[in-house]
């Protein structure tokens, strides 16, 4: 259904539509399923739940680095 990032999305409960995160931070599946061998039959990808990676810190350059 969601093809925003391709069809080869690795199942992860943190960005599944069937996942609920309770007050203590535990992930609970609404379908009572668990990932086994990297596969979950009820996995439904939701790109809005995915948290992007932080960008890498860029190095600082001096003006002397650009002189010939």
Image (cartoon, rainbow, N blue to C red):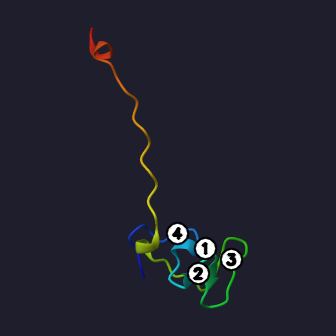
Up the image or down, 43 lies above or below 67; here it is: below
In the rendered image, which residue does mark 4 sit on? Answer: 9
In x, y percent, where is residue 6?
Answer: 44, 68
Alpha-carbon neighbours of circle 3 within 10 Å: few (<14), some, or many (≥20)?
Answer: few
Front disc: 1 or 3: 1
In the rendered image, which residue does mark 3 sit on? Answer: 35
In the rendered image, which residue does mark 2 sit on? Answer: 22
Q: Mark 4 or mark 3: which comes first in sequence?
A: 4
Q: Rounded to the nearest whole Å, what is the CA distance between mark 4 and mark 3?
A: 14 Å
Q: Mark 1 or mark 4: which comes first in sequence?
A: 4
Q: Rounded to the nearest whole Å, what is the CA distance between mark 1 and mark 3?
A: 18 Å
Front disc: 2 or 4: 2
Q: Rounded to the nearest whole Å, what is the CA distance between mark 2 and mark 4?
A: 24 Å
Q: Are marks 1 and 2 in contact (CB under 8 Å)?
A: yes
Q: Quadrant of residue 62?
A: top left
In x, y percent, where is residue 1?
Answer: 42, 82
């Amino acid at each position: 259904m969601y093809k925003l990032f391709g069809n080869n999305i690795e199942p992860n409960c943190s960005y599944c539509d069937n996942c609920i995160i309770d007050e203590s931070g535990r992930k609970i599946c609404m379908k009572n399923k668990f990932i086994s061998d990297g596969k979950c039959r009820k996995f439904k990808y939701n790109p809005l739940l995915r948290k992007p990676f932080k960008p890498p810190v860029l190095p600082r350059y001096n003006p002397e680095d650009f002189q010939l």
